[in-house]
Image (cartoon, grey):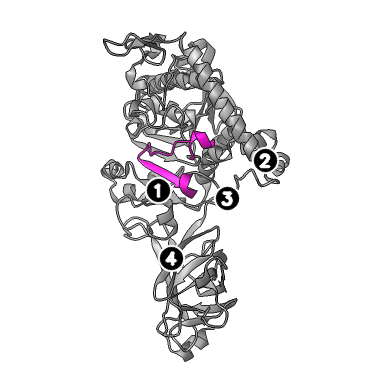
């Protein structure tokens, strides 16, 4: 009921937004005549290349390329600079809690703690957000804990309020403001633009892109679930794209589409585009789970509870990035054609090029950089348009270890061609134990083949797995007569061996990125006979005699 109510509110808000935007746009742009013979004024098409200039910042225009009948039907110019009132608040290790206001002026920079020799990180909030949000403080603190930096929080709260159409227009002016400050520091203080990293959420991600186009040699932009409405499907100059910085890495977490209240882009828009949990629904964000919002309210306060209720998936990109800053667990994304293929274990290991990449703060340590340090951007260009998949947890710490479990099924003469049911596994290592469902739903397993799936868990088994237990539950479905197994069929599962690979990011010079363990049945036969509701035990003793196997138990 709550979910339906929220969806209805979202759709009504979007409809109101578009209708009102159309009225507002008449005041900011002129109509056009389509063709020579049609004398029909349409407010969403410009009459000509319209331009407005903003003092020393430069000028903005609205041309036909900024319009699309579906993706971007309305366009306006930004509000005046005095209304948006973009401010830059500096934090360093000398002033980690009390920000200093800086401007593109000598006295402002020299009176502050800004150090041109240190790297500089910009944080840009999104729509209906402010720099006072909890996540901005959390990100700032984690960045300063990780490195001795200049952290500049961009405050454009005067322009991030509804209507959405106007807010999207305001991002262009905020981008000019950011570029103006960076270029001022480059030209007057010899700051290296390669040491500048802009981090933007939602509309803030596209704002970062607008700034990047105006800063030659900008080092990096991180887009945290870039906003979809008015940007997806549009030309590169309208949205965040790989040309905006030397490295553009993007985390997609809410790409269901605005019709289904998904606020983030699903299309790739960077050099490295990461799709945790398929980039749509994040674990722990199902608001139909009644305790979710009340517990968040008690634990984290009203602001966080509101985010969980309205935009949990959209905000998850922020949380994943914050968690990635100081974690020792690498968020390894694997390039794959689809999330389904990734979960099926079809894409595993980091054998060459940009097949693997690190999501989040340490994205610039990805394999392509390590292998091709002289010209890493040649490798990055190969990655453009591809998708990197991974899985994450429900809560902090979100990072998980990725394992591929391959169950090699035997086919003795008395086995059925296939059986249907559930298979659970327990993986034992000196570092801990992992228990997981290998078949989240009833699955058809064909004897004589190999069933493979990916398992994610917070425990790091460090590539040393000594024992695996498989639990088998046969499923009889009355709607499928072939699955009914009473007196005339065999419901046992026959397993020859289990192979467990653990995905790891390789160091310099290493060509692969996984640990592999093969475990075999501890019995006299070369396979385990697992009865319904029974279990089979597999040990790291492949190739040993029965006596030697028993000695290892």
Along the viewing direction, whichever of 259 and 56 lies nearer the viewer: 259
Using the image, determine if residue 113 lies above or below residue 451. Answer: above
Along the viewing direction, whichever of 331 and 305 lies nearer the viewer: 305
| Crowding at mark 3 (Cα within 10 Å: few <14, some 14-19, many 20+) | some
Real-space CA distance between mark 4 and mark 3, rounded to the nearest whole angstrom: 27 Å
Real-space CA distance between mark 2 and mark 3, rounded to the nearest whole angstrom: 30 Å
Q: Quadrant of the C terminus?
A: bottom right
Q: Nearer the viewer, mark 2 or mark 3?
A: 2
Asked whether 300 falls inside the magenta stretch, the response is no
Using the image, determine if residue 130 lies above or below residue 42. Answer: below
Q: Specify which label sits upstream in the sequence, 4 or 1.
A: 1
Q: Nearer the viewer, mark 4 or mark 2?
A: 2
Q: Are marks 4 and 2 in contact (CB under 8 Å)?
A: no
Where is residue 166 drawn, in percent x and y? 49, 18
Where is residue 328 drawn, in percent x and y? 51, 52
Q: Specify which label sits upstream in the sequence, 2 or 3.
A: 2
Residue under pointer 3: 397
Residue under pointer 1: 388
- The part of the image, by quadrant, that contains residue 469 is bottom right
Q: Which residue corresponds to the image point at 52% horizontal and 75% vertical from the top-left?
A: 467
Real-space CA distance between mark 1 and mark 2, rounded to the nearest whole angstrom: 34 Å
Q: Secondary structure at mark 2?
A: loop
Residue under pointer 4: 452
Where is residue 21 drawn, in percent x and y? 50, 17
Part of the protein shown in magenta: 256-279
Q: Specify which label sits upstream in the sequence, 3 or 1.
A: 1
Q: Specify which label sits upstream in the sequence, 4 or 2.
A: 2
| Crowding at mark 2 (Cα within 10 Å: few <14, some 14-19, many 20+) | few
Residue under pointer 2: 1
Using the image, determine if residue 214 lies above or below residue 469. Answer: above
Q: Secondary structure at mark 3?
A: loop
Real-space CA distance between mark 4 and mark 1, rounded to the nearest whole angstrom: 20 Å
């Amino acid at each position: 009921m709550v979910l339906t109510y929220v969806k209805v509110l979202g759709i009504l808000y979007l409809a109101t937004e578009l209708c009102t935007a159309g009225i507002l746009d008449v005041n900011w742009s002129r109509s056009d005549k389509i063709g020579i013979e049609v004398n029909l004024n349409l407010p969403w098409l410009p009459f000509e290349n319209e331009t407005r200039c903003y003092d020393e910042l430069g000028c903005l225009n609205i041309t036909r390329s900024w319009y699309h009948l579906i993706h971007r039907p309305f366009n306006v110019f930004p509000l005046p600079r005095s209304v948006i009132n973009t401010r830059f608040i500096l934090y360093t290790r000398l002033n980690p809690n009390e920000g200093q206001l800086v401007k593109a002026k000598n006295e402002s920079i020299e009176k502050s703690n800004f150090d041109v020799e240190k790297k500089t990180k910009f944080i840009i909030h999104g729509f209906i957000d402010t720099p006072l949000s909890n996540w901005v403080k959390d990100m700032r603190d984690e960045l300063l804990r990780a490195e001795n930096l200049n952290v500049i929080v961009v405050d454009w709260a005067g322009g991030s309020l509804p209507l959405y159409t106007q807010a999207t227009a305001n991002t262009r002016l905020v981008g000019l403001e950011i570029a103006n400050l960076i270029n001022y520091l480059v030209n007057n203080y010899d700051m290296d633009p390669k040491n500048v990293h802009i981090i933007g959420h939602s509309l803030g991600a596209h704002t970062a892109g607008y700034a990047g186009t105006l800063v030659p040699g900008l080092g990096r932009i991180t887009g945290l679930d870039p906003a979809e409405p008015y940007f997806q499907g549009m030309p590169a100059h309208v949205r965040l794209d790989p040309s905006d910085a030397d490295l553009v890495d993007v985390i997609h977490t809410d790409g269901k589409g605005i019709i289904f209240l998904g606020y983030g882009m699903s299309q790739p828009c960077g050099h490295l585009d990461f799709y945790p949990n398929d980039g749509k629904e994040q674990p722990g964000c199902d608001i139909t789970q009644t305790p979710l919002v009340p517990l968040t309210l008690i634990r984290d306060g009203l602001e966080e509870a509101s985010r969980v209720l309205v935009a949990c998936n959209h905000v998850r990109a922020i949380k994943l990035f914050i968690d990635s800053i100081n974690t020792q667990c690498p968020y390894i994304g694997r390039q794959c054609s689809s999330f389904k293929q990734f979960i099926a274990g079809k894409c595993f290991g980091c054998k060459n090029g940009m097949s693997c990449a690190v999501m989040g703060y340490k994205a610039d340590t990805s394999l392509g950089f390590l292998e091709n340090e002289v010209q890493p951007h040649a490798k990055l260009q190969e990655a453009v348009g591809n998708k990197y998949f991974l899985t994450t947890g429900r809560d902090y710490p979100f990072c998980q270890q990725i394992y591929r479990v391959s169950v090699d099924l035997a086919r003795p003469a008395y086995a059925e061609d296939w059986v249907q049911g559930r298979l659970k596994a327990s993986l034992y290592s000196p570092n801990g134990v992992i228990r997981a469902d290998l078949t989240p739903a009833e699955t058809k397993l064909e004897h004589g083949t190999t069933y493979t799936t990916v398992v994610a868990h917070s425990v790091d088994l460090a590539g040393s797995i000594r024992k695996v237990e498989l639990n088998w539950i046969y499923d009889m479905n009355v709607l499928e007569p072939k699955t009914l197994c009473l007196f005339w069929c065999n419901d046992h599962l026959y397993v020859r061996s289990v192979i467990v690979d653990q995905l790891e990011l390789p160091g310099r010079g290493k060509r692969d990125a996984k640990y592999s363990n093969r475990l075999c049945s501890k019995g006299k036969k070369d396979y385990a006979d697992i009865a319904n509701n029974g279990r089979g035990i597999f040990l790291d003793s492949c190739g040993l005699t029965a006596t030697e196997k028993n000695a290892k138990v």
